[in-house]
Image: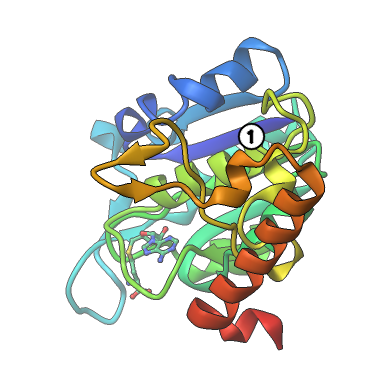
Amino acid sequence: MKIDIITVVPDILSGPFSHSIMKRAQDKGLLTVNVINLREYTSYARAQVDDYPFGGGAGMVMMIEPLVNAIESLKKITQYDEIIFLSPDGETFNQKTANALSLKKSLLMVCGHYKGVDQRFRDHFVTKEISIGDYVLSGGELAAAVITDAIGRLLPGVLNDETSALTDSFQDNLLAPPVYTRPENFRGWRVPEVLMSGNHKMIEAWRQEQSLIRTQDRRPDLLD
Ligand code: SAH
């Protein structure tokens, strides 16, 4: 899968994909992430990509022209399944969306900055708008990193244990059960006995029960 990300601050994205599972996904050739610097696509002086809002008011607005230059140039190489604009007023990201996007071949994500982007860009080029939650970030970069990570770890072969992603929270609308590791006894706090029993059927039943209890307790809305 290929994910291209357009940004005015490419440095923010130099970290999230260079370590751990996202690095492994790329090393294995299962995921390609390209970070594209929008400033390389502007024809304005001093690599300008934003300007004052028409009608006045605070903040700067990203201009449509550099964005369209970038997209039209990238589209010559890649046919995108979705052109995603990260935005607090987009549809809220969740595991279901991550699952659906992980089945796509190539995605383009556009990170806003400042006050956002010229609405005409959203109207005419964007196919999907995603928010990562009801709060405002200073730019779409961290949101793009969150979404790329959530999608990337779902690609077959990325996680070592193939079943691992399936037992995570939100798959099947359940939260994950508690997990424990060595030592068995720490300051008198013992690991639940069933986990030490070696009886896989009983362990599985216990985990299912714990998942349900945790979901009822913390996120009853998921069970509706
Ligand atoms: N004025 C805008 C916010 C601009 S924040 C508003 O009130 O809606 C600048 C950029 O950060 C946005 O264009 C978007 O790309 C990104 N961003 C901010 N919060 C986000 C969120 N919750 N999810 C996804 N992207 C977000």
Q: Position of residue 17 (x, y in %)?
A: 47, 26
| Residue 221 location (% of width, % of height) | 60, 86
Count numbered badges in the picture.
Answer: 1
Element class at badge 1: strand
Residue 127 in sight from this viewpoint: no
Q: Give x and y (percent) for residue 76.
A: 75, 29
Q: Nearer the viewer, residue 185 or 50?
A: 185
Residue at 49% in and 39% down: 6
In this view of the protein, which residue sits in the foreground, 142 or 43? 142
Q: Which residue is mark 1?
A: 3
What quarter of the picture does the N terminus occupy?
top right
Farthest-out residue, top: 27
- The 10 Å Cα crowd at callout 1, few under 14, some 14 to 19, many 20 or more, is many
| Residue 21 is at least partly visible in this image | yes
Residue type highlighted by circle 1? Ile
Q: Is residue 36 left or right of residue 3?
A: left
Question: Which residue occupies 69% across, 12% down?
Answer: 28
Quadrant of residue 199 within the rendered picture: top right
**Image quadrant where one finds the C terminus:** bottom right
Choose top left, top right, bottom left or bottom right for residue 57.
Answer: bottom left
For residue 169, above or below residue 221: above
Res. 220 image quadrant: bottom right
> In this rendering, would 87 be left or right of 138?
right
Which sits in the foreground, 128 or 159?
A: 159
Using residue 197 as the reference point, say whether residue 70 is left or right of it.
Answer: left
In this rendering, the answer to whether 74 lies above or below 139 is above
